[in-house]
Amino acid sequence: MSGNIIRHVVVRGQVQGVGYRAFVEQEAHRRGLHGWVRNRRDGSVEAVFAGPRAVVEAMIEACRRGPISARISALDHRDGTEIDLLECMEGDSFSVLSTI
C-alpha cells in the first residue's frame, strides 16, 4: 500500500441511533476508502479506514463532525494494520459490521 495508510478509529458520544454508521459508510464510499465500521456495546462506534493519507485524514475529520444528530465527545485514532482490514466482509470495499 505505497503512499497509503490504515487508521483505527473509536468515536464516543451520542453516536448510536443517530445514523452515524450510515454516515461513515457513505463518506467512506464517496472517498474511495477501504475498511469497515461497527457499533460497540459500550455505546461507541469503531472504524478502520485505509487509503491515501490525505483522504484518510479528511475522513477522520469528517468523523469528528458526524451527521447532524450526532454529538461527538471523543475521537481516538491509532495506526491500523492489514489484520484490521481482514474484518471487512468478503467482496466489500467498505463494510458495516455487526455490533461487538
Image: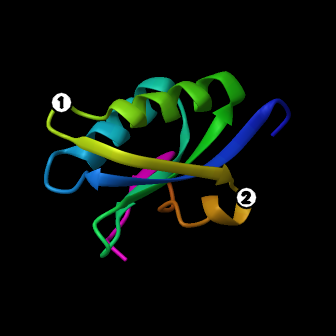
Q: Quadrant of residue 64?
A: top left
**Secondary structure of residue under mark 2:** loop
Question: Who is closer to the viewer here, 2 or 79?
Answer: 79
Q: Amino acid at mark 2?
A: Thr
State left or right for residue 31 relative to residue 100: right
Count numbered badges in the picture. 2
Q: Position of residue 20 (x, y in %)?
A: 26, 45
Q: Position of residue 98 (x, y in %)?
A: 33, 70
- Please identify the residue farthest to the right as the structure is shown: 2
State left or right for residue 69 relative to residue 90: left
Question: Who is closer to the viewer here, 66 or 93?
Answer: 66
Distance from disc 1 to disc 2, alpha carbons, whole Å, reads: 30 Å
Q: Amino acid at mark 1?
A: Ile
Where residue 81 is drawn, which disc sits there? 2
Looking at the picture, does residue 81 appear above or below residue 57?
A: below
- Please identify the residue farthest to the front as the structure is shown: 73
Q: Tell whether position 70 is magenta.
A: no
Kindly identify the residue that appears in the image at 73 percent across and 40 percent down.
Answer: 5
Q: Position of residue 14 (x, y in %)?
A: 22, 52
Picture quarter with the N terminus: top right
